Amino acid sequence: MVPPLLEVTGLSCRRGGRLVFDRLSFGLGAGELLALTGRNGSGKTTLLRALAGLTPPEAGTIIWQGVDVGEDPETWRGRLAWLGHLEGLKGDLTVAENLGVAERLRGGEAGDRLDGALVAFDLAGLAAREVRTLSAGQRRRTALARVVLSQAPLWLLDEPLNALDAPAQAAFRTALQTHLAAGGLAIAATHAELGIEGAQRLDLRGGGVRDEP
Amino acid sequence: MSGFTTLLMRDLRLVLRRPGDVGVVLAFFVVATVLFPLGIGPETNVLARIAAGVLWCAALFAALLSLERLFAADYEDGTLDLLLLAPWPLELAALAKCLAHWIVTGLPLSLLAPVLGIAFGLDGTSLLALGATLLVGTPTLSLIGGLAAALTLGARKSGALLALLALPLCVPTLIFGAGAIETLAAGDGIVTHVAILAALALVALATTPWAIAAALRQAGE
């Protein structure tokens, strides 16, 4: 049996004195998607932030390809693409500038891949528009294009379908399927169906022990 | 292009897209400084004696005006998360942002101050010395102010808190900056004062990026 690329063991997190989740364990292999579900406040975002290293867990380990990510956090961060509640875009920069800056901050160069990411989310016509002039859905698409552009093996997505219309949701699913088919991994907190066959589901009930495959 | 340069250029580009933000800071500096000659009257001796202190204090307050937004904008639009997740040291990101702040505030304030010094009756040598001390001293204000901005990120009344934190830490820079002009008026050189200002800047450079990064990580949790 092939060991999972990502192994989370005994992960516990506390916020504001409240135990958000306790001794959470799961594994994820190449090409797999994990959908995090649960009610508001159940800890989906906290789990994503803990996996990214933004929120320190109270206990537990996160192993990537057999190595504890805490041993080399910079390399770990380089393997992640992040989409949070907030888009992480600068309103006074154009769509193309935002994507280019984000990629260079990751140590890469968008180059020719920028056009592909823009086309994937129907943003080619908006590339020169300042982000503050865009609608919420267009900003979300720009943030998703940033995720695609990153070529990171692990996508951490918080409510990726927020504010997206049907064509944009379809574009997201296509991008996600392409990423998974190429051996990438994704963990997405969601209230909506992601519409990806074979996705694993982890239901976070919040405030207690959850340990579900 | 490295992450450091990218972040520096991004922040400078953002300032260029909204030049009014820097304009307000410089306008405040001019107005606050010019009020003194108007209030005190044309007593050249009095004005020349207080000139350095007034200009240094006004520069400090002007620099503080823009510091509140140094990290708050990134915090509010989610780009702080991207900086926290960038695969290079957050300390360098903190330094890049403080450098951008100095370029758009400390540098123009240093160039503008000698012009305003004319209104206080400062002679040519004193005007040059004023500009030189501000050039060497204002990076410290950006670094210490950056630390205060990071520590107060997400706090209510963060602007007032920022000032309360930053102002006491800027006192040594203020004393040696303003003191240099007084020393010059007394007939002595300003090399010692400039050297101390440079030393303070180096101490701030060697310590604040780490403290800012720690404060940003805390805020990002």
Image: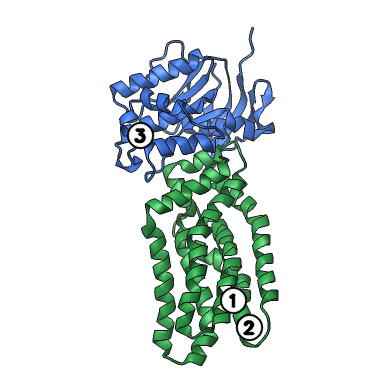
Which color has been applied to chain B in this rendered view?
A: green
Q: Are marks 2 and 1 in contact (CB under 8 Å)?
A: yes
The answer to whether residue A43 of the structure is visible from this angle is no
For numbered disc 3, what is the local secondary structure? Answer: loop
Q: Chain of mark 2?
A: B
Residue matched to label 1: B129
Q: Which mark is residue B184?
A: 2
Cα–Cα gap, marks 2 and 1: 8 Å
Q: Residue furthest front?
A: B124
Q: What amino acid type should be assigned to the residue bearing mark 3?
A: Ala
Q: Residues within 10 Å of mark 2 (few under 14, many from 20)?
A: some
Residues indicated by labels 3 and 1 sit on the same polypeptide chain: no
- Count of numbered tags: 3
Q: Residues within 10 Å of mark 3 (few under 14, many from 20)?
A: many
The answer to whether residue A1 of the structure is visible from this angle is yes
Q: Residue furthest top?
A: A1
